[in-house]
Image (tube, rainbow, N blue to C red):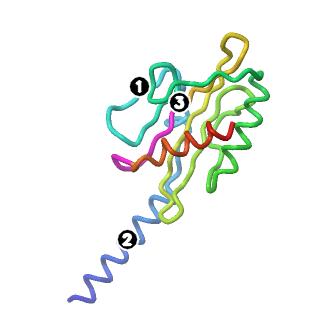
């Protein structure tokens, strides 16, 4: 009985891991505009925009130059891929998966021209669960510091 319980638990764990890692992230649901999205009140979400969790920094460069550098920074993040959009067109969403289980975090990034410069709007969040122990915020802050 004990061996069969362990076997069932192991199979359930493997099934859960496969579901999390291979369940596709639907761009129609997760490629959202960071300027207009409603941020949930629970943790695991971070919003960069005026009045958000992080106030945006204005960059003196044109949006094309900021987009090029930012895309380089984002795609150099381990296990990160483009989900939808094109940052050169001003708006893209990316998926970053955790190393062990492959939990997906989604970041939607938009470039906004402001007073002759460029500001970022970012909405980064987890897909599964309630809280992420600050992982999304740390990732976004890392991206911003590398710019």
Give the answer, above or below, for where 94 lies relative to 76: above
* Position of residue 112 measured from the top left corner of the image (x, y, whole percent): 65, 19
Decide if residue 39 is on the left or right side of residue 64: left
In the rendered image, which quarter is residue 143 located in?
Answer: top right
In the image, 91: left or right of 16? right
> SS class of the residue under badge 3?
loop
Bounds of the magenta segment: 123-131
* Dot 1: element: loop
Residue at screen point 69% across, 50% down: 76
Instruction: Give the quarter of the figure containing the C terminus.
Output: top right
The magenta stretch spans residue 125: yes
- Residue 93, how many percent across, how many down? 60, 37
**What residue do we see at 54% from left, 26% from top?**
33
Determine the residue located farthest toward the top in the rendered image. 115
**Which residue carries the number 3 mark?**
32
Q: Residue at x 70, y 32 (%)?
A: 87
Judge by depth and name the residue closer to the eye, 50 or 11: 50
């Amino acid at each position: 009985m004990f061996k069969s319980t362990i076997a069932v638990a192991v199979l359930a764990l493997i099934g859960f891991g496969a579901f999390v890692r291979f369940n596709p992230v639907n761009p129609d649901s997760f490629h959202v505009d960071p300027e207009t999205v409603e941020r949930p009140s629970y943790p695991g979400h971070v919003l960069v925009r005026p009045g958000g969790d992080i106030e945006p920094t204005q960059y003196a460069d044109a949006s094309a130059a900021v987009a090029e550098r930012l895309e380089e920074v984002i795609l150099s993040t381990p296990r990160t891929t483009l989900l939808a959009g094109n940052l050169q067109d001003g708006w893209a969403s990316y998926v970053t998966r955790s190393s062990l289980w492959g939990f997906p975090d989604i970041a939607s990034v938009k470039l906004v021209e402001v007073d002759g410069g460029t500001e970022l709007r970012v909405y980064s969040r987890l897909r599964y669960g309630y809280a992420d122990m600050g992982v999304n915020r740390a990732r976004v802050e890392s991206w911003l510091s590398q710019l």
